[in-house]
Amino acid sequence: MSKHRERSGATVISVTSAQPGRSEDLDSRIVRYAWMMSIRIACFVLAVLTPSPWRWMFVVGAIALPYFAVVLANAHRSATQPAPDPYLAPARPAIGDRPTVVVPHDEGASGDRPADTEK
């Protein structure tokens, strides 16, 4: 069976919309198939123990159940988790009526220091 451990009383927090693992899905399919095969065994036993008209219904059930058991066990996937709400980006600020132009401080054409720092 699966090798995962379950902690009793532990809160499970989902951080993704990923489906349950394959091991969990496999475990549930095995359980469903085993239940259906146990019904098949009951059909065989009842086919031996019941009178003729009922016997043939149980024989047909015992013959047809393996096909339905395989199809139903493999067709049913575990319940999907609901997808999270889509990410909505925050609104970007719009440019105002009059954009402001920032002009860098000009240090002079010859590369000298500005007049403020000579004192």
Image: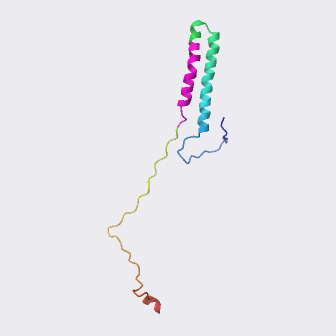
The image quadrant of residue 10 is: top right
Magenta span includes 68:
yes
Q: Residue at x 65, y 37 (%)?
A: 2
The image quadrant of residue 107 is: bottom left
Viewer-side residue, 32 vs 7 = 32
Q: In this view, does 18 lie above or below 52?
A: below
Viewport quadrant of the N terminus: top right
Determine the main secondary structure of the stretch shown in magenta: helix
Residue at the limit of the structure toward the left, as seen here: 97
Q: How many labels does the image show?
A: 0
Q: Which colour scheme is used?
A: rainbow
The image quadrant of residue 92 is: bottom left
Q: In this view, does 37 lie to the left or right of 86?
A: right
Q: Residue at x 47, y 89 (%)?
A: 117
Magenta span includes 40:
no
Residue 11 percent coordinates (x, y): 62, 45
Residue at the limit of the structure toward the top, as seen here: 52
Q: In this view, does 83 lie to the left or right of 103?
A: right
Residue 19 percent coordinates (x, y): 54, 41
Residue 26 percent coordinates (x, y): 60, 34
Q: In this view, does 101 lie above or below 72?
A: below
Q: Which residue is drawn at 60% across and 33% down?
A: 28
Residue at the limit of the structure toward the front, as seen here: 110
Residue at the limit of the structure toward the bottom, as seen here: 119
Q: Residue at x 44, y 53 (%)?
A: 88
Q: In this view, does 1 lie to the left or right of 15?
A: right
Residue 109 percent coordinates (x, y): 39, 86
Tell me which segment is drawn in magenta. Answer: 57-79
